[in-house]
Amino acid sequence: MILGIESSCDETAAAVVTPDGDVLSSIIASQADIHSRYGGVVPEVASRRHLEQISPVIREALFTAGIDLGGVTRIGVTRGPGLIGALLVGLSTAKAMAWACGLPLVPVSHLQGHVASLFLGDEPLEPPFVCLLATGGHTQVLAVRDHCSFERLGTTLDDAAGEAFDKGARLLGLPYPGGAEIDRLAQEGDPSAFSFPVASVPGFDFSFSGLKTSLLYTVRDLGEAATAERRADLAASYQRAIVIALTRRLHQVAEAEGLTRLAVVGGVAANSELRAALPDAAVAPLAYCTDNAAMIASAARYAEPLSPAEALVVDAYASAR
Ligand code: KG4
Ligand code: ZN
């Protein structure tokens, strides 16, 4: 039984996953309501909330799975990338538990965790495949040829796709986190009402800052009343530009790499238009798209664990390496 722990951003999460990838429990304490009044995640507030939540969330994950600590055979924990103070809460907890219970520990990359969300459940995706990883902090295209690593072929030069959704939502006066809000509103709007730019960046990289600026200018030109009236059209057109940018790259990389299977992971994979635009792509169940600990436990199944003594010297890291 693998206990997964995740605390890289504003979700405190713990899960119990079997070696075969069955999820016995996945508990997520979201802090979104705390941060929404600031329009984004406040790192210090996130760290403090993680501290309050981490023990009860782990306890609940064990309880729901019907096991106690004695039933855990391995701990997987997010080591980075993410908010350093937030990561340290989960990592320190995992190290303390590993040391106290004599359990092996696997430090997991949050990005590898998102990929490993595809390896959960009854019909896990088998490598090789091309994977779009689109979250609030990262947007990358990966060639995944085995269960424990990936090759990064493209990344964003500025904002992440989720960040573009969140910043766009803010410009439209929608609450944080904005991705799901734009998704919902776009269903009532006309995606061809406004023409927003899709950046043409060399290679397989992405850029979303020009799109965000374009929305800013459009909203400014329209004025408050017209923006409010045409919010659904703006959301639909803005979302369409993001979806085109993402799907175009995914197909280009798949062709260049000669890989036929496609997959999408990360919070933005929850987007209904993106899912509809990629009918043949493997997408993790919605519950495992946004941050969760089942994906971290899943990734921990494939890596060589550290002994409790080795685990004590593991440190968190903030940015992707
Ligand atoms: O993977 P995730 O939960 O956290 C990070 O690792 O960043 O992704 C969060 C991001 C946020 O930017 C959020 O707005 C976006 O995923 N998101 C969506 C949707 N649901 C969440 N974006 C577009 N459409 C959605 N339905
Ligand atoms: Zn994430």
Image: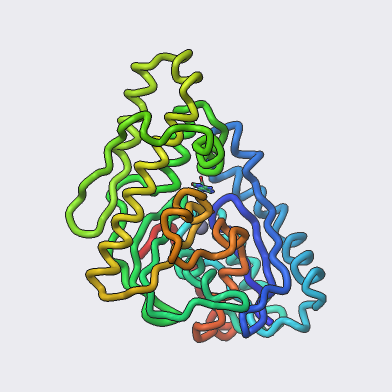
The picture places residue 85, in percent across and down from the top left corner, at 54, 54
- Drawn side of residue 105 relative to residue 100, left or right: left
Please give the name of the residue rendered at 24% of the width and 44% of the height, measured from the top-left corner: 199
Q: Kindly indicate the quadrant of the structure image that contains residue 301.
A: bottom right
The picture places residue 236, in percent across and down from the top left corner, at 44, 36
- Number of numbered tags placed on the structure image: 0
Furthest toward the left, the residue is 202
Give the answer, above or below, for where 191 lies relative to 299: above
The picture places residue 91, in percent across and down from the top left corner, at 58, 66
Give the answer, above or below, for where 42 lies relative to 250: above
- Drawn side of residue 282 relative to residue 58, left or right: left
Colour theme: rainbow
Please give the name of the residue rendered at 48% of the width and 31% of the height, measured from the top-left corner: 170
Using the image as rendered, state which of residue 98 and residue 158 is in the foreground: 158
Using the image as rendered, state which of residue 15 and residue 122 is in the foreground: 122
Please give the name of the residue rendered at 46% of the width and 81% of the height, measured from the top-left corner: 126
The picture places residue 23, in percent across and down from the top left corner, at 67, 73
Q: Kindly indicate the quadrant of the structure image that contains residue 257.
A: bottom left
- Quadrant where the C terminus sits is bottom left
- Quadrant where the N terminus sits is bottom right
Q: Is residue 42 visible?
A: no
Q: Kindly indicate the quadrant of the structure image that contains residue 78.
A: bottom right
Using the image as rendered, state which of residue 249 and residue 99 is in the foreground: 249
- Drawn side of residue 70 relative to residue 274, left or right: right
Q: Is residue 75 visible?
A: yes
Please give the name of the residue rendered at 26% of the width and 75% of the height, measured from the top-left corner: 258
